Amino acid sequence: MTTRRDAVKALAALAVAGLAPREAMAATGEPRRIERVGVQLYTVREAAKKNLLATIADLRRLGYREVEFAGYHGNALAPLRQTLDELGMTAPSTHVGIEDVTTRFDATAEAAHALGVRFLTVASIDTAPLKTADDWKRLADTFNAIGRRARGAGLRFAFHNHSVEFAPVDGRIPFEILLSGTDEGYVAFELDIYWAVKAGQDPRQLFTRHSRRFSMVHLKDATAAPAQTMTEVGSGVIDWKAILALREKAGIQHYFVEHDAPADPMGSVRKSADYLLGLQF
């Protein structure tokens, strides 16, 4: 693995220009490209556990400009922020548990500010107790309360979906309950494209029905039905051009590549980066 020092040195000139080698080839000035491709660090979690700073440097070399944290693996926050700054990278979001933004909000917010994080994004919730539509409405109220507190702290609250939020309860779709029951001024959503498609949803319809609600997206592809196995972006059947063409309507600000269980994590994020950095839509 490339060391942090080596990566910073090799990328210094490009960081000043705001480009990495792969980006330099892709940044032609043409319209309708993703300006800053990000990655959810859960994808490379084993490498991150061993050396988070070096892993981030490796991702920069692949063309990634943003990261979304999935824990800090015991790293001190100051050197972590320094690494991001030196590499010309940012961390717009961090994945947290619901307890992190309820019972541990102050500590969670302090860490976010130290790293330049804007979105406190709940990665998942225990849906077992949510048996009725009213249960989901109460969760929406909880999200609003968290969102108000986050906004008061100069941050934003967001929620990341899986497929379970699309399973009907009392004849209603829980994800729709959350969208309709939350205030867009306080609660944002990070749509996981793969899990939405896996659940039979069309992301384009979600973007159209709920304009400007999706500040972030997770980009991961799916093989053809019925298996719909998770795969690298551009390697499956999801129509990325059609989906990303609606990015303004959706309100998307950040795009994070993710693969939950890749056989070769760095190879996986490299393949997705290559596709996305060359994509025009």
Image (cartoon, rainbow, N blue to C red):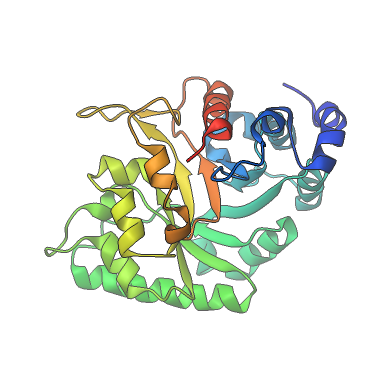
Across and down, in percent, residue 89 comes to: 72, 45
The number of numbered discs placed on residues in the rendered structure image is 0
Report the residue at 65% width, 58% height from top: 117
- The residue that appears at 22% across and 73% down in the rendered structure is 134
Above or below, comparing residue 74 to residue 107 in the picture: above
Image quadrant for the N terminus?
A: top right
Which sits in the foreground, 107 or 123?
A: 123
Tell whether 30 sits left or right of 226.
right
Left-right relation of 151 to 58: left
Q: Nearer the viewer, residue 279 or 197?
A: 279
The reply, left or right, for residue 12 in relation to residue 202 is right
Residue 178 in percent (x, y) is at 32, 67
Of all residues, the one furthest to the left in this rendering is: 171
Residue 4 lies in quadrant: top right
Question: Does 155 sit above or below residue 8?
Answer: below
Q: Position of residue 228 (x, y in %)?
A: 27, 30
Answer with the quarter of the image where residue 63 lies.
Answer: top right
**Residue shown at 85% from the left, 30% from the top:** 5
Left or right placement of residue 159 versus residue 31 in this view: left
**Percent from the top left, x then y, of residue 112?**
66, 60
